[in-house]
Image: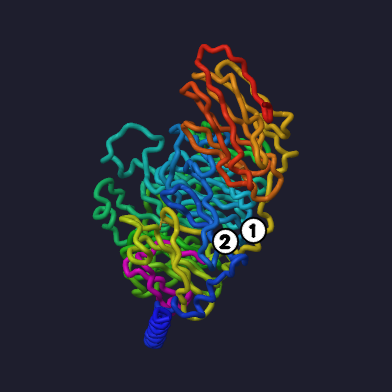
Amino acid sequence: MKNIFKLSIGFLMAAVAFTSCNDQKSGQSGALRSSNAEKVYVAPGEHDSHYAFISGGYSGNLTVYGLPSGRMFKEIPVFSQFPTNGYGYSEETKPMLETSYGFIPWDDSHHPDISQTNGKLDGRWIFINGNNTPRIARISLTSFETEEIIEVPNSAGNHSSSFITENTEYVVAGTRFSVPIPQRDMAIKEYKGNFKGALSFISVDPEHGHMDIKFQVLMPGFNYDLSHPGRGKSHGWFFFTTYNTEEANTLLEVNASQNDKDFIAAINWKKIEEYVNNGGGTMMPANYAHNVYDEATHNATSTMKKEVRVVNPAEVPGAVYLLPTPKSPHGCDVDPTGEYIVGNGKLSANLTVHSFTKMLDAIENKKFDGDAYGIPILKFEDVLAGSVEQPGLGPLHTEFDGKGNAYTTFFISSEVVKWKLGTWEVIDRKPTYYSVGHLTIPGGNSREPFGKYMFAMNKITKDRYLPTGPEMEHSAQLYDISGDKMELILDFPTHGEPHYAAAIPAEIIKNNSRKIYRLAENQHAKKATSDADTKVVRDGKNVHVYMTMIRSHFSPDNIEGVKVGDKVFFHITNLEQDFDVPHGFAMIGANNAELLVTPGQTRTLTWEPKQVGVWPFYCTDFCSALHQEMQGYVRVSPANSNIELSWGLGEE
Ligand code: RUQ
Ligand code: CUA
């Protein structure tokens, strides 16, 4: 009684304190207002209105959240092995992580982007870049599985990626580090003038989504930081921010901050595409992996590609221009109309906005200010649309709400600032906790944003949550942006380091979500689609087990005749044809991970028994009342034993 009393008094006092605070500065404390709690409350059993796909950064993966609840639904493995379901461990998925450097079990993923048709999110696929070992992945938004990964040659630090054009003609990947192209042994201090930056245009097959590098533009040796497609009137162009136009190779924090202005590189990809379609460009020897997962065979294959088409900008006059942009710009964002190109100069006091119309005019009238390696530099004043004066410190990224407003994050002053396109006036600012990087508005990178929610992804968490040792998960903050002022309505933790995120209304995706794989359509060469198909076959030292799983047994569940030194391949098919009934498989002493096999799917785990004995396996996913009974044994005999292979289920 007493405690309840104390609690309610405390609550009242807090409520009073926050209300008065709100009156004074319409502030950050809004999160505690009960009307805000209602805004994010999704009652048990109800669904969220939006999906958010948040990059996992150094987890290498992609996480799926619901908005407005901030609940995490799934982690989709992309560039990293994922013991939770065996991705990158099973024989079927290992080829997804092949590269020209061999098998790579990890990457650093940054910028997810959802496929578009006519500049609108179509919800078919989501693309994301591997930053460290340059790769682009395509993930199906039907199965929520990674279906394809293509390595990007001639690239290093694949950061100005992966952004797509408005009909998903291309997914574009730009290099952060310039490097010798082709790679060769040379002195680092000879960087300037010799290294190059490759901007890769990867075509996407409109029906199946298959990726192919159409061409790479070999640019001067700057750092290409971020990029965005033109849209609407500027469709056909692509814009990249650059820094280190000084081409320094050491102590970049000083040496790459010398120039008053770096550039936004504007690439007329339509023009280059036409040139390439007419046979332009040069085929250059290369070596890069192209990994494709086939949903019908449940298998991935990896192919090494041996050449890539490169284009020198000098070969295609009128295709590449440089727009001077103050000081080491990071984000490069294009508004929904395609008219404004926002460059966020990290060290600049103002935000610079270029005009696409003025850019075309400056090109037409040759308003140049010299060139860099033959690429015309447009006159700053002649392309400038306007600037937002002193909006904050350390601008990073900008998104749009489709109502004529832009929202920019400021890392140093830890805030999101809302400003008006065209008048450049600041309308609102709200703090973020703390040191915000990217922000996302559903569809905020398309012609039709859904300007109801915005969330900020912060780099530093500190006291926002209960402490969890020296490392805290990063935090996101959700704002209601439907009114004039932004209102903070929720804090939620994220996983890894979210760089960008892509979000979309749930209706566009949820009805297409796959429920099962049809057994009748399973084309896996080693499937067993009924207990009658199960068998164990010896091929020299390789033993192939064709196994099935169904509530609540494996077939076979007893296997004898395996020997030390054998390599056992468990090819396991889940016979369930019911939504959300995976079974797991784990084998004692296996040097990899479990398998989580979804209904109708076949997966293979390799096990190399090292010790004589009788060794159990079991189902890892609590699938039924008799889940604990879902188990079996493999008898392992000495290498020289002559025990014949035998297997069975239900034999006494
Ligand atoms: S970055 S926090 Cu990798 Cu997109 Cu700007
Ligand atoms: Cu199958 Cu537990």
Q: Which amino acid does label 2 sit on?
A: Tyr
Q: Can residue 590 be seen in this view?
A: yes
Queried on whether the Cβ of the residue with tag 2 lies below 8 angstroms from ligand 1, the answer reads: no
Q: Mark 2 points at which residue?
A: 51
Q: Residues within 10 Å of mark 1 (few under 14, many from 20)?
A: some
Q: Is residue 116 above or below residue 635?
A: below
Res 459 quadrant in image: bottom left
Secondary structure under the numbered disc 2 in the rendered image: strand
In the image, 120: left or right of 389? right
Is 423 colored magenta in this rendering? yes
Q: Residues within 10 Å of mark 2 (few under 14, many from 20)?
A: many
Magenta range is 412-441
| Residue at the image point whose x is 52% and y is 31% from the top | 306
Residue 492: x and y in percent read: 45, 64
Residue 9: x and y in percent read: 39, 84
Image quarter hosting the N terminus: bottom left
Which mark is first along the chain, 2 or 1?
2
Distance in Å between CA atoms under marks 1 and 2: 8 Å
Q: In this view, does 99 lie above or below 64?
A: above
Residue 56: x and y in percent read: 46, 52
* Tags 1 and 2 touching, CB below 8 Å: yes
Is 81 colored magenta in this rendering? no
Q: Is residue 320 above or below residue 93?
A: below
The label number, if any, that marks residue 509 in the structure image: 1
